Amino acid sequence: MSTTTHSAPVLHLEGITKRFGSLTANDSITLDITPGRIHCLLGENGAGKSTLMNVLFGLLEADEGRITIGDQPLLAKGPKEAMDAGIGMVHQHFMLIPVFTVAENMVLGSEPGRAGLLSISDARARVRELSERYKLDVDPDALVEDLPVGLQQRVEILKALAGGARYLILDEPTAVLTPQEIDELMAVMRALRDEGRAIVFITHKLREVKEVADDITVIRRGKVVGQATPDASETELASMMVGRDVSLQVSKAPARPGEPRLVLDGVTVAAPSGAVAVDDLSLTVRGGEIVVIAGVQGNGQTELAEALLGTLPVAIGTVTLDGVDITDAPPAETLRAGLGYVPEDRRRDGFVGEFSIAQNLVINNLREFANRGNLRLDAIEANAIERIEEFDIRTSSHTAPLNSLSGGNQQKVVLARELSRDLSLLLANQPTRGVDVGAIEFLHKRIVAERDAGTAVLIISTELEEVESLADSIAVMYRGRIVGIVPPDTPREVLGLMMAGVSYEDAIAGREGSGE
Amino acid sequence: MSTTVIPDAPVRTSKTVESPAKRRQRLSSGTLIAIVGLLLAVAAFTSTGTSRIALSDAFDEIKLPTIEVPAVPVVALAAAVLLFVGGFFVAKRVPKPYSTWLGVLAGVALLVGFIVWVAADAPLPFTLTNQLNGTLQYATPIMLGAMCGVLSERAGVVNVAIEGQMLTAAFTASVVAGLTKNLWAALFAAVLAGVLSAVLLGIFALKYLMDHVVLGVVINLLATGFTGFMFHQLVKDSPDLNAVAVMQPVAIPGLSQLPFVGPILFVQRPLSYIAIVSVVVVWFVLYKTKWGLRVRSVGEHPHAADTVGINVVGTKFSSVLLGGVFAGLGGAFFTIGNSGAFQTTGVTAGNGFIALAAVIMGRWHPVLAALMALFFGFSRQLAQTVGPLQTPMPSEFLQALPYLITIIAVAGLIGRVRGPAADGVHYVKGH
Amino acid sequence: MSEAKRVEEAPPKDHKPETKPKASYSKWLNSAAVTFWSLVLAFIVGSIVMIILDPEVGEKWGYFFARPGDALGASWEKISLTYISLLQGSFGSWVAFTETTAQATPLILAGLGIALAFRAGLFNIGGQGQAIMGAIWGAFIGFTVKGLPLFVHLPLVILVGVAMGTIWGGIVGFLKAKTGAHEVIVTIMMNYLAVYLLQFLLQRPAFMAPGRNDPIGPVVEWSATMPRLAGSRLHLGFLLALLAVVLVWWILERTTLGLRIQAVGLNPHAAAVAGINVSRVTIVTMAISGALAGMAGVNAVTAPELITSFPTQLSVGIVGAIGFDAITVALLGRSRPVGVLLAGLLFGALKAGARTMQVRANTPSDLVDLIQALIVLFVAAPAFVMWVLPFLRQRKTSRTPKPKAVAA
């Protein structure tokens, strides 16, 4: 294997342009992918990185430009041709079938067996052989949906390698991993590079780029805006990525915490599957402070948020808001009790895309905008015009469907709706996910302003940047429990260890023991 | 390569509690079973004398004795079993294999109790062989229709059109049988009609991205309109086309001589044999072949299938077409398979919809769906078998029973079933 | 860089052309054009089927190359005779026109029910059963209660029939909301239950016409019959159907319930998060849907016939295939009240003209069913219509592919 990969030629993308209607997602991008190197594609959410890689992998057809491997043009009409040419891809959203076993997923598309019959024992053997060769252990008979995300990603990588990938694309692979798992992934990437493979590593996290990249290409709004070397500073890379100087830190006054407003006492929540997701969790949030729950995705944060809102039942324990028991109250009641809720998955839970901005702005507060069940259309319109102004929502009209807005503006609508009510608690789960930097700053400012107005603010975030810039105190969550509550200036390594379940004391000790 | 062990990515804790949905389902199942038990207990006291259950009928070569049981104690015992199982479910969580077995026990108790109660003090014995033989016969088109449903839904195409597909096939079979006087040619034509209707389903669902359920309803209407129009225009006044022979039951030499089992399983109409074989074939194809793996993958996660180079639309289309074969066979049952010439009074009688119900209740699995089809067949035949016994129950009630039980089963016992994840979802490359 | 500039060049993920009133107008125009051409296509396909299957015309096509005039002439004659008699039967005279309104009444009522359910994301295949329940109990009150004045009796009949439809639909909503039972399966089964109940009742003395042994109900009292314009089939039911159109429009566009129904239909997750009780909305929507279908059933047993001026007596086929016809009406009307009204009138006209067509042109009335199905097929598959008629594509100005899950 390694003899062939060593001689692999350079993969060359020349002037790739991809348009979606009036929008140019990739604008004449030229890129070299060299075997034996890790090439980082750095760019904001929506900059066009994934579109480019989907073109390379044959999932999308470019409008202009060409791709060559050495002297050979690559005519990938579909993933099959791309794979035959040695391109493998680990997708951001895993391309695994949850109800299939690891072995079935691994052989799908190139199944072993004679005369159309499927040989599961051969499939199993293939998985074992691969995991042996790359020292990535997986159980061929496990159902993918039962595996933790880290292992699912391992299956994805093995699947790409099984196709004989000489050029391996990893699309935002670190989003779902703990810092320790990220380190391990980077080790895997280096090892594969040293075997002579080309690695394309797509990310928007500067730290990771600096740590692992050999080459860096920065993409902004569909265009290559520059190349950089790994010794470029984070601020340099950030300003290239965003197109202007950015402050990575929100300036905010120190918190003046008041009375406890949200009190969780021994709360246990089960996921719909019955698995305990939040395990005997106690937490207090005071008025005028921002508590950020930090943790790797899938440690019970989503279930906690849903239980507070009332879409998941609280199995054990009590939740009080301003002294009122809202344990197990349905959303209609918790919202009336003063909960402002910004859901994690905006498109799914945050709004009705076909509804107008005006309708979405009142959807969870219909009583105020109706008279005995009849809508007060003028009041709804006036409210919309006011909020659009106040929250700087970019739109042609308040009657525009929300689907027609950008992610940042959609999130502004959601936040505007919540903040326009009189809140006791603002609960925001991943408030800036998939939002451009300009809107992030705005959203952060509004959240801080709400804190300063005396509201208790509880943020759930998996992004350390966001955790650090917003938190007055950080509660680290791991496997449904709070591992510890630490101040916002806690070093990242310590937070990282805590996010893997290590207690604060051990994390501090471990850092001093191994680090310096 | 690093050999350090990566700690598994954090998962939810290994503890589980019973989710409210499961709990509700358990309680409602338990209550339901207990209520049925209670009804049976009341029934037990209304019955008198003995129940006679015949294991062979007058035409069988080997006569088996007619079982006579005292009605009251047997019905009471069955009621007790039901009450016990129901109470058990209500009282505590039952782990998986045991809950299934308890459910089966309750089902058997209900069946025995009901039959004994119906047959109590009746002038004629309850003929078990007739009941079971008829079950298979009624179940035949439902089974075949269900195989059509399983194949297309597993590939992610919701199929509400089974009824229309079968209707088209039934009509075609009748006309071709009238024209050629050859039943096998007619059967072949029916299959062809089933496949053609599947082509319509496939093209509009996969190429023109029409909503699958709407499309299904439309195909049913088209089938009604088209067959009706053709029938009135061409067939109705032609004595030739209306003279249609029927496939006669075939006794399998040797096996049909077996006592009890023989007359039930081995003296059937050809399509019933074909139906049973079909279930095995569909199961094998879906779970043991490369194509089957691909079909299941495009129904679950078409995007993932695309990334490994599978032709998503092609795979879906092929599965829908294969489904058409079974819809064609099932449709043929309503004319040449069982009753003769086509009529416009709804020869398929909603069996396509029942087949769809069987698919969903059978959780999109061919064998389970076939079992559900047998259940429907059983309760239909029950209305026939019980009819002459002069029971206190109106026959409409017995006829309505399978539908009532389906509602109860879908609502109480099955609840939210998880079908293929991408069922009914359009797949467009690059979106 | 200014903020405004950034938005202009918004990232691909969520970018779509901002909707302007002009764009939505052209979208409406386009959808109207597709609907119109769907109708035309359906009638063309209907003509082709008609010619191919007509033995006499087919014969002339046999010697087309010898005497093409024969074949073409015969075909034209067949087609024009069929469609003209269809038109005469539906709009050719005042009586024909009132027949159209009478045929449209149940279609509009039940169609509104199906449409409302569609808007909540529910597929009510149970219009049939709900209409049967309405018919059974409306008729029951109509022929058992005697001696009441019209303005008491008829409302009572309507109330009871509608209430039974409400219950029959509400049960489905309840089961869906509380247990997750799929409404398509449950409604199909509920249809059978209603049919067997009707069959059962029609053999009980209380439901049998005096002096008859076949399953047919007694004639309802005159005080339970819809008042009509003398000598026509225009009766109060049609006015009630128009009223229902306004009512459903009002619910959908002007009330919190309507906004909730639409939110649940478009995005149940977001609706739940916004504090909308999805279960309650599901139950209420199915109940209203059932009520409207039930009203269609009441109409079937209270609408006076042209000649006898008595309503049709209760029998097994009393509501026809209203459940499925209503689905086509809702689909053609794009689940909007005014659309349902127009679609109901169109299909009502087809039904009204079918008899005349069968008698005068000797074309089986099944042609109407066929055309009805084809119309819905084409309307629901605009991509197909645009493939057949490519000139429609240019009108679709805002047709850009949605770059949904691809961008970073």
Image (tube, coloured by chain):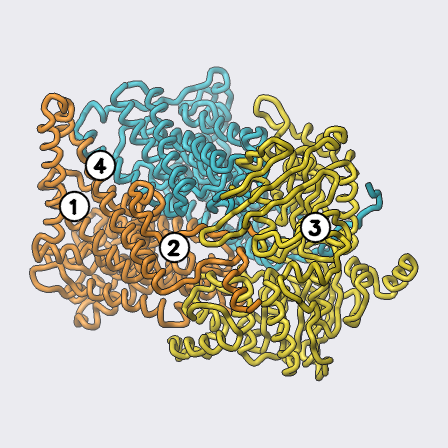
Chain colours: A yellow, B cyan, C orange
Q: Which residue is mark 2?
A: C398
Few, some or many residues within 10 Å of mark 1 (<14, 14–19, 20+) = many
- Kindly identify the amino acid type of the residue bearing the numbered disc 4: Phe
Give how far apart the Cα atoms at labels 2 and 3 are. 38 Å
Taking depth in this image into account, of A485 and B120 the one nearest to the observer is: A485
Tell me the tag on residue A216: 3
- Does A342 sit above or below residue A202? below
Give how far apart the Cα atoms at labels 3 and 1 are. 73 Å
- Does A460 sit above or below residue B399? below
- Kindly identify the amino acid type of the residue bearing the numbered disc 3: Ile
Taking depth in this image into account, of A506 and C352 the one nearest to the observer is: A506
Taking depth in this image into account, of C196 and A311 the one nearest to the observer is: A311
Q: Which residue is mark 4?
A: B229
Residue C65: x %, y % from top left: 14, 22
Give how far apart the Cα atoms at labels 2 and 1 are. 40 Å
- Does B212 sit above or below residue B194? below
Judge from the rendering whether residue B34 lies leftward or rightward of residue A514; answer left or right. Answer: left
Residue C119: x %, y % from top left: 39, 60
Name the residue at 75% across, 57% down. Answer: A232
- Kindly identify the amino acid type of the residue bearing the numbered disc 1: Ala
Mark 2 or 3: in front is 3
Q: Which residue is mark 1?
A: C354
The answer for which chain carries disc 2 is C
* Label 1: element kind: helix
Please determine if labels 2 and 4 lie on a single subunit: no
